[in-house]
Image (cartoon, rainbow, N blue to C red):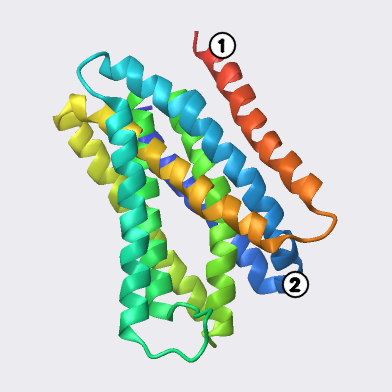
Amino acid sequence: MSVLVYILIFNFIGSIISLAGGIFLLFKEKVALKVSHLIAAFAAGALLATAFFDLLPEAQKEAGKSVDIFLWTLIGFLFFFLTERFVHWFHSHGHTHKEKDIKPTVLLIVFGDTIHNFIDGIAIASAFLTNIPLGIITTFAVGAHEIPQEIGDFGLLLHKGVKRSRILWINFFSALASLLGALLAYFMGNAVQGIVPIFLSITAGFFIYIAAADLIPEIHHENRKGFAFYESLLLIVGALMIWITIQLLSNFNT
C-alpha cells in the first residue's frame, strides 16, 4: 500500500475520531460536557508525548545537522500563538460587547476549526512521509486532542441556536480542510524531501502549544472538586499510552 493511500485512510480515521466527541454531544449533551475536561487531560498527555518522544526524535533523525529542528519547533509554537491572537483580536475589535467573557461568533468557530483541521492534515501527512508507525501515532494524537475541541465547538454552535443537522454539515466541510492539508504536505514533501523534518518540527510546536496553552489551562480553569486526581492521572496515562505505542510499533517495524 502506497504512502498516499495510508495518508488518505488515516486522515479519514482521524477525522472520524475527532468528530466522535461532537456527535456524541448532539445526542448526550450533559454527559459529554461533564467528561470533556477528562478527555482534555488525556489529550494533553498524548500530545506532549507525541511531540517529545516521537516527532522531535524523528525530525532530528531525518534532518541530521542540516535543519535546526528546535528553531522550527519554536516557529510552530509562535505561529499557532499568533494565529489565535489574530482570531481573538479580530473578534474583540469587530463586535461590541457587554459581557467580559465573550463567546466567538459562529463564523469564528468554523474558521478556527477549519484552520485546526488543515494543520492536523499537514501533521498526519508529514508523519507518514517519515515512516508508517509515526503516522499512526500522530493520527491517534490528533484524534485525541480534537475530541474535546469538537465537544466545545459543537456546544457553542448549539448555544448559538444552530440546528443539529447544520452543525453536522458545517463540521463535515470543515473536516475537508484536513484532507487539503494532507495532500499539500504530501506533494510538497515528495517535491522537496528536506522539508519533512521542518514539517515534523512545526507539528511538534503545534502540539506543545495546544497542550500547554489550550488544554492544560482549561483543566486548571475548570477546577472541579474531586476531579484533580483523575485529570492528573489521565494526563499521565495519555503520555504513557503514546510511549508504549511507540515502543510496540518500533519493535514491530524492526
The circle drawn on residue 251 is 1
Residue occupying image coordinates x 66% and y 68%: 25
Q: Residue furthest right?
A: 226
* Residue closest to the far top: 254
In the image, what residue type sits under mark 2?
Lys
Task: From the viewer's perspective, tell me whether residue 157 is left or right of residue 73.
Answer: right
10 Å crowding of disc 1: few (<14), some (14-19), many (20+) = few
Instruction: Answer left or right for 164 relative to 126.
Output: right
Inspect this view and state whether residue 3 appears.
no
Q: Could you tell me the amino acid type at mark 1?
A: Asn
Q: Is residue 103 visible?
A: yes
SS of the residue at dot 1? helix
What residue do we see at 38% from left, 31% from top? 127
**Residue 45 percent across, percent down from the top left:** 61, 39
- SS for tag 2? helix
Viewer-proximal residue, 130 or 169? 130
Q: Position of residue 64 (x, y in %)?
A: 27, 14
State the image coordinates of residue 138 (x, y, percent, origin top left). 47, 36
Residue at x 69%, y 35% (from the top left corner): 236
Tag 2 near tag 1, CB within 8 Å:
no
Lower sequence index among marks 2 and 1? 2
Q: Which residue is mark 2?
A: 30
- Tell me, for residue 25, which label it has, or none: none
Q: Nearer the viewer, mark 2 or mark 1?
A: 2
Q: Is residue 8 above or below residue 130?
A: below
Q: Quadrant of residue 128?
A: top left
Q: CA distance from mark 2 to mark 1?
A: 42 Å
Number of marks drawn: 2
Q: Position of residue 87 (x, y in %)?
A: 34, 68
In the figure, 212 relative to 104: above or below? above
